[in-house]
Image: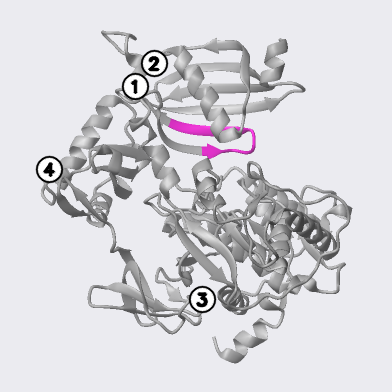
C-alpha cells in the first residue's frame, strides 16, 4: 500500500495524543448497548464525559499525592466504565496499571506501585455520585500511559510500560491499514490486555466508531447481537476475537441469518489452526485476519490463512533472520524504534513474508541434562493422532517434564488402561531421540487446546492442568466450555492417586458419590460464580461407579430463584451417567435461618 493510499484511508483517524474524546459534538454515539431497547441503545459522548468527571472526582479525593504522580490499578469487564476510568486518570496526568489477572497475590504485588484500585476489584474505588464536569490536561508523547504485566508461561509477570507515543503509532497504523469507517466494534477479548485495549477500546475512540457497551463472550450472544444490530441499523460490524472463541463456534446457530453483517474479523493471542480459520469464515461469512505480536512488541505481522499461510509484516515493521533463523525486528512502537530487537521466534523469510518455526528460548534442565522443550513439542506433534503438544518443566516436581497433548477425538483415552497404553506408545516413540530420564512424566490429554481469553496457554491454564499434583483431592481438569452465564461443561479425569479412593474399596477403588457432589459444587463456584451453602439435595443418583483413570464430562446448569440458586449437575463418561442431581444453594445468612 502506498503512503498516499494509507493517508486517504486514515482521514477519519484522530491521534490518541489529540484526545479525540474531547470532541465538542457531545451527541455523537460512543457505544451501543445491545441489551437495551432500540430507542435507548446508544451511549453518547456526553455520557462518557459525565462518567470521566465522576471518576476524576473519585481520584482527586483519594490520591495521596498531587496530580501526575499516581498509578491506579484498574480492572473491570465493563467497557464504558473502563474507558471512563482510563481517560479520567490520563487527563489528571496519572498512569494506569492493568493487571494480568485478578488473583490476590497478583494484586497485592501491584498495590505497592499504585495509589489504589479502581473498578470491580476487592477494595476498589468506584465513581463518585452526582454531576462532575471533566477536566482536561495534557497527554505528553513520552509519558507512560499504561503499565501492563505479561502472564507468560513461567508465572513470573514482566512489567511493560507503554507511552502515549507508542500507542499512538500503532493505532495510526491500524487505522490506515484496516479503517473502521464508523462500523460497530464487537469484542470477545479482554481490554485488560494490549490487544483488546488497542482494538476494542482505543481504535473505536480514535476512529470515532461505536463499540459494544458489553463484552460479547458467547457465540449465542454474538448471534443475538448481530441480529439486533442488523434490525436496528443495517450497518456493518467488526469482530475482535481470539482462537478459543473462533474454534468453538457451534454449527447449530442460524449463522446465514446474520451473514454479511461482519465486514472484518481480527484474531490474536496465538496462531489459529487452519481448519478453525476456515470453520469461522464459513459460519460468519467473513475471512479471519490474524495478528501476530506480543505485549512487549505490539503487532508484528498479519495473515489470512485461506489466502496465504505466511505472515506479512505490518506497515513500518522491518524483519530479518540471523544464521540461527532467529527473528529480529524493528518497529515504531518499541522504546527504541531504530534498534533491531531479537525475538524468541524462529522464522524462514520468504520474499517480504515469513513462516514461523517455533520458539528458541525453551530450554530446560531435567535431571541435570539440558533439553529443548521445543524439540519435544515438535517430536510429539509429528506422531499419529497428535494435533499439538506443549512440554514444560514442573519445578515442584523436581523439574520433571509435563506434557499437554491435543489429540484427535478417536485417540482420546477414556479409561485407565487406555491412558497407560497411550503414554507407553508416546514414550516409546520418543525414546530413539531422547534419553529415558528426560521423557515427560506427567501427561494431560486434551481434545481442545486449553487457552485463556487471549488465546494463550499461559501460567493460569498450566496451573489448572497440573493442579491435582499438589491437591490430592482434586480431579484432573482438562477442559471447560461456558455455554452462557448459567451453563458450563468441564472435562475431568479421575487421578489414580486421588485421596478419596482410600478405603473405597480394596478390590476395586471407586470415587464416592459425595466426592462427585463436592466436585460439582466447586466447579459451579469457580466457573459460574455460584457461591453459597448447599441447603438441600433432590433427585441425587449415582447410577454407575466412577473408576480411577476414567474420563468424564461434568455438566452444570444454574437457575436463580428468589432467595436461592438451583444447581443441576450431571457427570457422564463413555460408559454412561455416573452422577446426577439438583442442589439448592443459599447465602450463609439464609442458611442460618433455615
Q: Nearer the viewer, mark 2 or mark 3?
A: 3
Report the front residue among 227 and 162.
162
Say which element carries label 4: helix
Asked if the magenta segment contains residue 277, the reply would be no
Residue at (81, 74) in percent of width and height: 23
Residue range corresponding to the magenta coloring: 481-491
Magenta segment, prevailing SS (helix, strand or loop): strand
Q: Residues within 10 Å of mark 1 (few under 14, many from 20)?
A: many
Q: Earlier in the sequence, mark 4 or mark 1?
A: 4
Q: Earlier in the sequence, mark 2 or mark 4?
A: 4
Q: Which residue is mark 4?
A: 436
Say which element carries label 1: loop
Say which element carries label 3: loop
Q: Nearer the viewer, mark 3 or mark 4?
A: 3
Above or below, comparing residue 334 to residue 512 in the picture? below
Q: Which residue is mark 2?
A: 511
Q: Which residue is mark 3?
A: 333
In the rendered image, the quadrant that contains the N terminus is bottom right
| Residue 213, horizontal then vertical, whole percent | 73, 54
Taking the image as shown, residue 131 lies to the left or right of residue 57, namely: right
In the rendered image, the quadrant that contains the C terminus is top right
Amino acid at each position: 500500500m502506498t503512503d498516499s493510499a494509507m493517508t486517504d484511508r486514515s482521514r477519519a483517524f484522530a491521534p490518541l495524543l489529540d484526545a479525540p474524546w474531547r470532541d465538542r459534538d457531545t451527541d455523537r454515539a460512543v457505544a451501543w448497548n445491545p441489551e437495551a431497547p432500540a430507542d435507548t441503545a446508544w451511549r453518547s459522548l456526553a455520557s462518557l464525559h459525565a462518567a470521566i468527571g465522576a471518576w476524576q472526582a473519585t481520584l482527586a479525593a483519594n490520591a495521596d499525592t498531587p496530580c501526575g504522580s499516581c498509578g491506579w490499578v484498574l480492572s473491570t469487564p465493563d467497557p464504558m466504565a473502563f474507558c471512563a476510568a482510563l481517560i479520567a486518570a490520563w487527563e489528571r496526568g496519572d498512569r494506569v496499571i492493568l493487571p494480568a489477572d485478578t488473583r490476590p497475590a497478583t494484586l497485592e504485588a501491584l498495590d505497592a506501585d499504585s495509589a489504589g484500585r479502581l473498578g470491580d476489584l476487592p477494595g476498589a474505588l468506584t465513581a463518585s455520585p452526582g454531576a462532575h464536569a471533566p477536566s482536561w490536561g495534557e497527554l505528553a508523547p513520552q509519558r507512560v500511559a499504561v503499565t501492563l504485566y505479561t502472564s507468560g508461561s513461567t508465572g513470573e509477570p514482566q512489567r511493560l510500560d507503554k507511552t502515549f507515543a507508542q500507542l499512538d503509532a500503532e493505532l495510526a497504523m491500524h487505522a490506515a491499514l484496516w479503517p473502521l469507517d464508523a462500523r460497530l466494534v464487537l469484542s470477545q477479548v479482554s481490554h485488560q490486555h494490549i490487544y483488546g485495549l488497542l482494538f476494542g477500546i482505543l481504535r473505536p475512540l480514535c476512529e470515532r466508531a461505536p463499540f459494544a457497551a458489553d463484552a460479547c463472550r458467547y457465540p449465542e450472544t454474538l448471534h443475538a447481537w448481530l441480529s439486533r444490530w442488523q434490525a436496528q441499523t443495517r450497518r456493518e460490524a467488526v469482530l475482535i476475537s481470539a482462537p478459543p472463541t473462533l474454534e468453538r463456534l457451534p454449527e447449530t446457530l442460524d449463522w446465514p441469518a446474520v451473514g454479511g453483517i461482519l465486514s472484518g474479523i481480527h484474531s490474536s493471542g496465538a496462531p489459529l489452526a487452519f481448519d478453525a480459520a476456515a470453520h469461522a469464515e464459513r459460519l460468519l461469512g467473513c475471512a479471519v485476519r490474524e495478528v501476530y505480536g506480543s505485549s512487549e512488541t505490539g503487532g508484528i505481522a498479519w495473515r489470512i490463512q485461506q489466502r496465504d499461510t505466511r505472515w506479512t509484516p505490518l506497515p513500518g515493521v522491518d524483519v530479518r533472520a540471523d544464521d540461527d533463523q532467529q527473528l529480529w525486528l524493528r518497529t515504531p512502537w518499541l522504546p527504541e524504534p531504530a534498534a533491531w530487537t531479537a525475538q524468541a521466534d524462529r522464522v524462514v523469510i520468504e520474499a517480504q513474508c515469513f513462516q514461523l518455526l517455533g520458539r528458541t528460548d525453551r530450554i530446560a534442565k531435567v535431571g541435570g541434562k539440558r533439553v529443548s522443550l521445543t524439540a519435544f513439542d515438535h517430536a510429539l506433534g509429528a506422531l499419529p493422532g497428535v494435533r499439538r503438544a506443549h512440554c514444560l518443566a514442573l519445578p515442584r516436581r523436581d523439574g520433571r517434564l509435563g506434557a499437554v497433548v491435543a489429540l484427535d477425538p478417536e485417540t482420546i483415552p477414556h479409561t485407565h488402561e487406555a491412558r497407560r497404553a497411550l503414554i507407553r506408545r508416546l514414550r516409546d516413540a520418543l525414546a530413539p531421540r531422547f534419553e529415558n530420564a528426560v521423557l515427560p512424566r506427567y501427561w494431560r490429554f486434551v481434545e481442545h487446546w486449553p487457552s485463556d481469553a487471549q488465546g494463550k496457554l499461559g501460567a493460569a491454564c498450566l496451573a489448572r492442568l497440573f493442579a491435582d499434583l499438589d491437591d490430592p483431592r482434586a480431579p484432573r481438569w482438562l477442559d471447560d466450555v461456558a455455554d452462557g452465564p448459567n451453563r458450563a461443561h468441564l472435562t475431568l479425569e479421575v487421578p489414580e492417586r486421588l485421596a478419596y479412593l482410600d478405603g473405597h474399596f480394596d478390590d476395586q477403588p471407586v470415587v464416592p458419590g459425595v466426592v462427585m457432589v463436592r466436585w460439582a459444587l466447586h466447579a459451579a463456584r469457580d466457573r459460574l460464580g455460584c457461591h453459597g451453602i448447599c441447603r438441600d439435595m433432590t433427585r441425587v443418583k449415582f447410577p454407575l461407579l466412577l473408576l480411577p483413570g476414567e474420563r468424564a464430562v461434568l455438566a452444570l446448569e444454574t437457575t436463580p430463584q428468589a432467595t436461592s440458586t438451583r444447581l443441576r449437575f450431571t457427570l457422564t463418561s463413555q460408559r454412561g451417567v455416573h452422577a446426577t442431581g439438583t442442589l439448592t444453594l443459599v447465602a450463609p445468612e439464609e442458611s442460618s435461618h433455615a
